[in-house]
Image: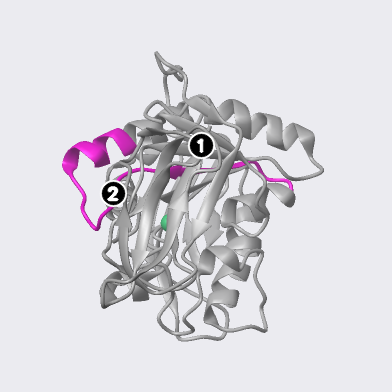
Amino acid sequence: MKESITFGGITVEPGAKKSGLAKVLDTDYSFPITVINGAKEGKTLLLTAGIHGGEYPCIETAFELAEELNPAELSGQVVIIHPVNIEAYFARISYILPSDQKNINRLFPGDKNGSIGDKIAYVITYEYQMKSDFYIDMHGGDIHETLPPYVYNPGIGDNKECLAYAEEAAKHVLSAKYRVRSVATTGAYNSCAILGVPSLLLEQGGRGLWSKKEVNVYKADIINIMKFLKIYPGEAKLPEKPAKLITKAEYLDSTCSGRWYPMAGLEEKVKAGQVIGIIKDIFGKTLCEVKAKYDSIILFETVSLAINEGDPIITYGI
Ligand SMILES: [Zn+2]
């Protein structure tokens, strides 16, 4: 006999679904969650959207999945946090949690004695990720960023079986044009895999925009992974064209503040030594020219004219 499940203080009987606000430890912060307890036995999938509050395609995808997934059809459990960074979502700001000015995605596995962002990361790690069999962190380009559809699978961790399973799942992300085996450690999905639970990060959209088309593509990707996990009925598909594996990439941050002029478009092929962006000061003096070190493709760009020292500006890779 299947049992009821509890996440974020919300208990759900088999074949049922409940939504509500889940409190973060001793803080006044709570995020919206939907807990779906499928009618049949199976794996538990955790989905988080909006760790960055301005990434609308993934946030709308999470909203719609929370409404549309039918527990009667599911074999297993699905828990959706939509969005994690509800404070930034309503403030309509990118990257950070307004309360402590931290980027939650750099705080994992979190700290229960830290600031609100640290506590959110801690709660997601120990009250959600570690109670799941698989984790997908849903992102996109933030309000002033643009990127093509991506999937990242974790590449660091002692549990090789976990990493191999995540990599196999990553190959089933239908829309991904690029795939990266990440060597980062503090991202929500990286930290999760280091602790032994397989995970992925998906990216779709950007520029503070969202469309029904992007959301439908995003939902189809998540449902295909749910089929791969045997939570959703039907056979998981592989994409007609596999994503290009990026094995080497440069993630450049701005070394100064001013006006940002990207000189190559998204997915454009660039040559070693080519100027791919220029930063000028407010009065028009060129402060720096950003050059590609090797022949590569532009994989991410900041699209805002305004740029601050330390902001991500451009990524190229091969
Ligand atoms: Zn993000």
The image shows residue 171 at horizontal and vertical percentages of 52, 25
Magenta region includes residue 208: yes
Q: Which residue is mark 1?
A: 272
- Label 2's element? helix
40 or 310, which is in the foreground?
A: 310
Q: Cβ–Cβ below 8 Å for labels 1 and 2?
A: no
What residue is shown at x 30% (from left), y 46% (from top)?
205
Where 47 falls versus 216 (above or below)? below
Q: Which residue is mark 2?
A: 57
The total number of labels drawn is 2
72 or 293, which is in the foreground?
A: 293
Q: Is residue 48 among what the camera can see?
A: no
Identify the amino acid type marked 2. Pro
Image quarter hosting the N terminus: top right
Identify the amino acid type marked 1. Ala
What residue is shown at x 28% (from left), y 77% (from top)?
282
**10 Å crowding of disc 2: few (<14), some (14-19), many (20+):** many
Upstream in sequence: badge 1 or badge 2:
2
Q: What range is drawn magenta here?
A: 196-218
Q: Is residue 308 among what the camera can see?
A: yes
What residue is shown at x 21% (from left), y 49% (from top)?
210
The image shows residue 23 at horizontal and vertical percentages of 48, 76
